[in-house]
Image (spheres, rainbow, N blue to C red):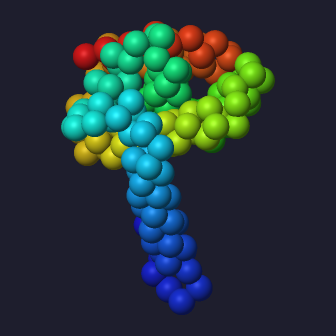
Amino acid sequence: MAKIGRMGGTHQHIRAVVARAAAAALSLALLAGCGAAEKVTGKISSDPEKEARYASPQDPLARPLQVAWTSARAVRCGFIFDPNQLRANFLAAEAQSGKTQEDMAEIQKAYDYTYETVSASIKEDARYCSKERVAAIRRDLNRYLSGDYTPSARMGR
């Protein structure tokens, strides 16, 4: 349990939560401004998991949607890996594939938005990590950790 005191632990945690919330709000605002929000969120979608699961492989945002979606799900289900390193490796692979700076900005925004919204939407579901879902996450996460970012993520019920 965190100590509440003058020197910090809880205050630092609160500042970190506020900073993350502000970053998520900024990402959403940026996505709305560049038109990527329609692709990432389906404009009025209330189910970010559905958007990631059914992203067309031809959609240029399918890869960041599905990698971020899998990462958020893996964190929720207690997989031991570094989600920040997965993000960095994914973005590096995208950059090495010849994407423009504008493309990379959109990819990064889509990744971050998807990760944040999926994390928020599944955090309270006590039954989220079913046996089948964990198996599906494991398959996709292992592919992504090995550098294969082909869009084909599975949801698992």
Q: Quadrant of the N terminus?
A: bottom left
Can you see residue 2?
Answer: no
Task: Identify which residue, 52 or 127, lies in the foreground.
Answer: 52
- Residue 149, horizontal then vertical, whole percent: 60, 16
Question: Relative to residue 70, is residue 14 depicted above or below?
Answer: below
Which picture quadrant has residue 89? top right
Observer-nearest of 152 and 60: 60
Q: Which residue is nearer to you in this view: 154 or 53?
A: 53
Residue at the image position 47 percent from the left and 58 percent from the top:
26
**Left or right of 113, for residue 117:** left
User: Going 44% across and 37% down the picture, which residue do you hit?
Assistant: 36
Residue 13 left/right relative to 48? right
Quadrant of the image occupied by residue 86:
top right
Horizontal arrangement in the rendering, residue 6 relative to residue 1 (left or right): right
Q: Nearer the viewer, residue 18 or 156?
A: 18
Using the image, determine if residue 91 lies above or below residue 9: above
Q: Classify residue 154 by image quadrant.
A: top left
On the image, the x and y values in percent for residue 157 come to 25, 16
21 lies above or below 86: below
Residue 127, x across and y down, in percent: 23, 31
Q: In the image, what residue occupies the spot 53% across and 28% down?
A: 64
